[in-house]
Image: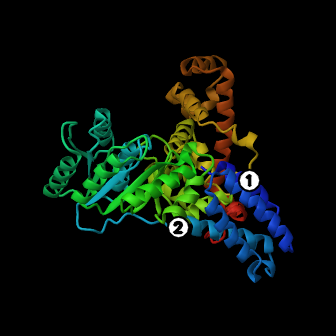
Amino acid sequence: MFENLSERLGKTLRNLRGQGRLSEENIKETLREVRMALLEADVALPVVKDFIEHVRQRAVGEDVLKSLTPGQALIKVVNDELVQLMGEANNGLNLSAQPPVVILMAGLQGAGKTTTAAKLARWLKEREKKSSLLVSCDIYRPAAITQLETLAGQVEAEFFPSTTSQSPVKIATDALDYARKHFKDVVIVDTAGRLHIDDEMMSEIREIHQAINPVETLFVVDSMTGQDAANTARAFDEALPLTGVILTKTDGDARGGAALSIRQITGKPIKFFGAGEKTDALDPFHPDRVASRILGMGDVLSLVEEVQQKVDQDKVQKLEKKLKKGKRFDLDDFRDQMLQMNNMGGIAGLMDKMPGMSGLPQNVKSRVNDKDFNRLIAIINSMTPQERIHPTIIKGSRKKRIAAGSGTQVQDVNRLLKQFTQMQKMMKKMARGGMAKMLRGLKGNMPPGMPF
């Protein structure tokens, strides 16, 4: 998300860095470029107008024009206003209510409500240690009920059965009674969607809402619909007391207009965003971190959290002990590193969180391909245990056998061995205390306030 906006804003604001003096004229020119970037990102026009006016008022004030580093000061103003636009801070779920906490999922058909309901159950289990009961009130699509049951099994949440012959209100109230009797922490109610907003749909979901009185009523919306997403959210908010929004399919949205429009148009916070079909692809929406990513400063906090959540810390500690004892980094270790990277969404998924990555040329970014990881893992899997520990024994005939076993070419095996040698050298330096030097080297690219 935000690739196009980040690239456009990055070019515009990079021209300001290091300038000793700004005038009202070049501020005006910069804001014209920012305005065009936001409109091209499909941000709603009223939102763009308000945003530019707020930045302009602050930009021509003393905090920018009289700053010792006016270019940096203007970038900070843009960053602050982006954060303000999207809601200042993450607005989490209200889980302090008397259990079971009821969460009602609303939205149009195809927005990803059912998948998001399961993702939310997994997030609650892993991050909040809450047990969830999933129930489908979509009596119009039998496949939706089956889909939610399947997903409930995948995320290890209990599923409350329902059929197309029941009324949606009865299904929801029965599920709530069951959750109370079985001491469930959360009930997640998936409702029917329509291809467009209609009176029948709104009437039904209002009846469900009135019957179960949810603590959270979340509007699930496809971010790829741009500013239409914000307009649809507003229509739902007029019919239901929404408490927040979940943006879906953000991995396919290079513009980001929905994320920048929804808060101001509806007044409701974006609580989560989903990127991908996997059940772990749901993250809390932090406006300050998102603004940092838009302006090319990365998102180190989310990167750290992701490492803590998804990296096998036992394997990391074992590798550290191994290297400290002077033992060599081998191909089994190399494979483990790549598998860990895959668990975190691959290199492409991490790049936009790294400081400075938005400044990379597009042709360099396009060369990043997570399929290469899978090819390298397949090559290592085709080796014998002895070859993984002692890669120097891998010569001509062994290379041919490994290539044939992994469905690759000999030159692919050669490329892997070369990459492994480079990684081995880097690990050797880290074992000698090189990690501290590497972090100090990164410091210049870190966002302000990072504790390095």
Question: Quick check: can you spot residue 20?
Answer: yes
> Could you tell me which secondary element the residue under label 1 belongs to?
helix
Residue 124: image x %, image y %?
34, 56
Q: Is residue 91 above or below residue 426?
A: below
Could you tell me the amino acid type at mark 2?
A: Gly
310 sits left or right of 396 in the view = left
Residue 55: image x %, image y %?
70, 71
Q: Which residue is mark 1?
A: 8
Q: Is residue 163 above or below residue 295?
A: above
Q: Is residue 330 above or below residue 245?
A: above
Residue 229: image x %, image y %?
51, 51
Question: Quick check: can you spot residue 317?
Answer: no
Name the quadrant containing residue 61: bottom right
Could you tell me the amino acid type at mark 1?
A: Arg
Q: Crowdedness of circle 1 by 10 Å Cα count: few (<14), some, many (20+)?
A: many
Q: Crowdedness of circle 2 by 10 Å Cα count: few (<14), some, many (20+)?
A: many
Q: Is residue 202 above or below residue 409?
A: below
Residue appearing at x 63%, y 36% in the figure: 369
Towards the viewer: 352 or 140:
140
Q: Which residue is mark 2?
A: 87
Cα–Cα span, label 1 and label 2: 23 Å
Towards the viewer: 93 or 316:
93
91 sits left or right of 264 in the view = left
> Could you tell me which secondary element the residue under label 2 belongs to?
loop
Towards the viewer: 327 or 7:
7
387 sits left or right of 202 in the view = right
Protein image colouring: rainbow
Where, quadrant-wise, is the C terminus in this rendering?
A: bottom right
